[in-house]
Image (spheres, helix red, strand yellow):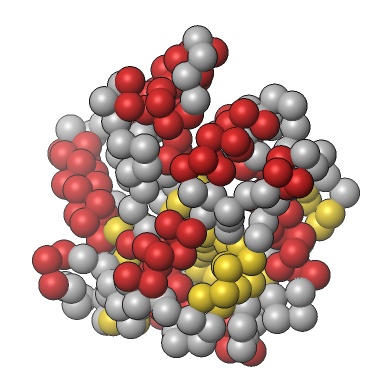
Amino acid sequence: MFTYIDPTVRQRLEQQGKLFQIDRDGVRVPQDHVPQSGAGIALLGPIPLPLKLGDREFEVDWYACVRRTELGKIEEIADELRAQHGQASFATLASSMAVNSVLVIGNPADWENPLVRVHSSCMTGDVFGSQRCECGPQLRMALERIQDDEQGGMVIYMSGHEGRGIGLWAKAATYLLQDGGENTYQANRSLGLPDDSRDFGDAGSLLKFFVQDRPIRLLTNNPKKVNDLRKMGIEKITRIKHVTGVTPSNRGYLTAKQDWGHELTPEDLDAD
């Protein structure tokens, strides 16, 4: 794996324990082990990553995570580029691989019941600061709550979940449909797309690795996310309400979420 990284660098990272592999059950396996059906996740980390969001600073260990099946495809592209001496084209590797992230606060070995946020990527909210959703404030608040909690915990940032799994281009189209009067779920259906197509399989594997069989407190308003993780064997989940970032610009969006099943009260939607 990672044949497009210089072999000596790869070997050094492996010897340091900074490049390793887990199977779908979250069990660490040898680098040369090929999990059944190619399943499994490669991790790079821990990487010290001091963060500053607003006036808050966070001491975080970052793990970059990629499915083994995606690495296999990337290795083939890398070999082709090498054969063509296409060094400038190596940028295509970045656009062909979804890299999830784990942000760890505290020492997982000491966790008994950590706070966990499984956060779907949202470029418009997390990066641009859009107020059409509450994603950016939810991410920041999750880090604050985890850092302030005596247990610590982790954020699993799912890179392939833009627009509940439809991608940024389709999400842009749904925004235009929403401006025409449809809600966020109706807009998906108008495009022939599911209400929610996110896959939490990788999150389940990462939770099994970092938390093992200990209980977690999951920061979410979405019972479906809890149910999906429980189906993957993460059974000891206590759901913790996670409401923030409510504005006039996203109140209709949150009302649609409430109608779809998110556990939000009228008082939650009146908050600022």
Name the side, left or right, on which 268 lies relative to 235.
right
12 vs 264: above or below: below
Q: Quadrant of residue 103?
A: bottom right
Q: What's the residue at 40%, 65% (across, down)?
A: 227
Between 224 and 176, the one lying in front of the other is 224
Q: Nearer the viewer, residue 127 or 62?
A: 127
Residue sitting farthest toward the right? 55
Which quarter of the picture shows residue 42? Answer: bottom left
Q: Is residue 159 left or right of residue 37?
A: right
Q: Position of residue 221 (x, y in %)?
A: 58, 55
**Residue 165 visible in image:** no
Q: Is residue 38 above or below residue 94?
A: below
Q: Position of residue 104 (x, y in %)?
A: 61, 69
x 16%, y 39%: residue: 80
Looking at the image, residue 190 lies above or below residue 203: above
The residue sitting at 75% across, 64% down in the picture is: 145
Q: Quadrant of the N terminus?
A: bottom left
Where is residue 32 drawn, in percent x and y? 20, 76
- Asked if residue 179 shows in the view, the reply is yes
